Amino acid sequence: MSILDLINGDEQANVYQRRLNTLKKQGRQTEHISNGVTDVMAKLSKGVNSLVVYGEPQSGKTEFMIALVCRLIDEGRKTIFIVMNDNTELENQNYKRFKRVQEIPISPLKYQEFLDLPESDKRSENTKIIFCRKNGNNLRKIIKEARFLKDRIVLDDEADFASPDTKINKEGDSPSTINQLLGELGGLPPKGSGVYIGVTATPGRLDLNNTFLNDSAEWVFLKSHSRYKGRQFFFPIKEQDGGLKYILTRLPEQGDDPKHLKQAFLRYLVRAAILNLKDGLNEVPIAYSMLVHTDGKTNSHIADMKQLQKHLSVIKNQSGPIEAYLTYMKSEAERVITDKGLNINSLEALKFILSNISKSTILQLNHKNDKANVEEACNPNDTFTIAVGGNIVSRGLTFDRLLTFFFSRGVKGKLQQNTYIQRARMFGTREYSELFELCVPGKLFEDWADCFTDHELSLRSAMAGDYVHIHSASNRPSDSSSIDKKNTISARSEWLLGSVQEIPPHFEEKFTSSNLRPLDLIESLLATNELLNATFNRNFLDFIRETSADDQSDIGIVMSESGFYLLDRTDADEETITRKRGGLVASVIKGRPKYMDKLHIIMPAKNNRGEMRFHYKNQLGKKVLKNIIR
């Protein structure tokens, strides 16, 4: 053995485990990360070379990606391209996150750094981690210079953005530019055998587009850590005891009265002060931020900034209408202190504001020179940090210690799910969630909630193995140009709840003789493993429970006189226990009034082989799109 071999030893081994150990020492939860990484590696080991990883907005997907890269290094993978939106601020944020990870033994390179390497380094077989924005010019340059690199993996952050082929329905056309270049970069399907791993909070567009031939049956679904506040917290499907657990301020539907932004700003100052006071004042105040998103146009941002600067000036200089401002803030402080049972005097909160107001900043995002502004908005240093921005705040950026989100940007026509799911910038680790305020027009909030409900229902169907894309009158799952119309159908609102299973002895009798309510019966059979999770997915069971009445009176189980419905009709597929043209539940319950008032209808069907499968139909007024390529 050479001296070089002795020196190198196993220094680069167990990179992944060392990363998990570091996170644990920091008090971070790691189970959701390790489970996700394990699932991805299992897919790769069985030959899957195109898959999607789903995680809620701001739920820790970047940390998952870091851990996955560590594991890929341990596995000896040679070339890892990390691609992201064509946004330098987002690239910098992610690049710095990776760069700071001491466990990674290879310094990540931005694409320009790779281009500048000596030719010998470009051709070497050393592992390389290369960051590149989804920008046509950048991708073309790196494709040319990386032509010698082997064993390629493309890790695509915000994968549903720019990566799908938006020319998929145009006969004879080449794929859209970014889709084609990413395919060339990674040697991806359908032409190559490179590995594609798309990571996103809105995966529906990737399925409907058949991007790089990903198969939703092979997707990985990340769970969120216990401190995460996401869809279930901000848009609960079922009404909670005591109502919402955060502060929701419904703005008027029409008009743009500046007083609403002013009042939201003053309330933000009060709650930031209270948070700093409630557990004893720290030597250095904790900075909290307010995010204002009213429009996508720069001129509107400037107008918002001028308003906020005027209000800030009044407080800083204690001039003009200062007494009116203080009166409003004192009233707000008293209300919050009383509601939360805090031992704070409202005058203490006002004193904190006046003492610290000079350490405040108003930042404009989405402007020509706003790189530093984005970083400061995401990780605030000034006690009172207010960010005003447009499209950049709608995707990818993580806002730490965000306390108020003033979101009044309307939409013409239907909300697009992949856009409005991403705009939920209030999601994240919010330890102070009871004092978080969301300011949004009432109708927009309701449509937003419907958007999340439909998106969640779609994901539950994907987890159950039969991905259908649910949408309502107020939203749509994706832009029309990205939907592979040749392989997508509009279907009725029914689908499968899992796979085929052999019927256990006396199983049907438990459905015909049980006194349990529908979901309680199914839960009991899952608990005894008579009914497998693969047959009736628990994620879907939980969703039905969340969207049904407490007494389950709006749930029906369809049975024939002798037990399960026997699927022996001429248009049946006995192997899959399905009706070839769909609509099985609808055809069976037609003319049976007892099912007309049910919101959720579950129908166990069987074949002549002694096997069963569960079909589901909802009557929630949803529309369905389904990929039929597989």
Image (spheres, helix red, strand yellow):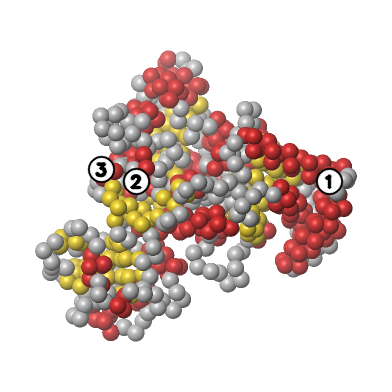
Quadrant of image for the N terminus? top left
Label 3 to label 2, Cα distance in Å?
Answer: 13 Å
Secondary structure of the residue carrying tag 1 is helix
- Give the amino acid at mark 1: Ile
Classify mark 1: residues with Cα within 10 Å, few (<14), some (14-19) or many (20+).
Answer: many
Looking at the image, residue 195 lies above or below residue 240: above
Looking at the image, residue 263 lies above or below residue 109: below
Label 1 to label 2, Cα distance in Å?
Answer: 51 Å
Residue, far left: 570
Label 1 to label 3, Cα distance in Å?
Answer: 60 Å
- Within the image, what quadrant is residue 592 found in? bottom left
Relative horizontal placement of residue 186, taking residue 68 as reference (left or right) = left
Secondary structure of the residue carrying tag 3 is helix
| Residue 496 percent across, percent down from the top left | 28, 61
Residue, far front: 255
Looking at the image, residue 216 lies above or below residue 92: below
| Residue 503 percent across, percent down from the top left | 21, 71
Classify mark 3: residues with Cα within 10 Å, few (<14), some (14-19) or many (20+).
Answer: few
Question: Which of 397 and 62 lies nearest the eye of the viewer?
Answer: 397
> Does residue 86 appear in this view?
yes
Residue labelled with disc 2: 207
Q: Foreground mark, 1 or 2?
A: 1
Question: Which of 209 and 37 lies nearest the eye of the viewer?
Answer: 209
Residue labelled with disc 1: 315
Which residue appears at 50% of the width and 46% of the height? 412
Contact between labelled residues 3 and 1, with CB atoms less than 8 Å apart: no
- Give the amino acid at mark 3: Lys
Which callout, 1 or 3, points at the residue further toward the start of the chain? 1
Contact between labelled residues 2 and 1, with CB atoms less than 8 Å apart: no
Numbered badge on residue 486: 3
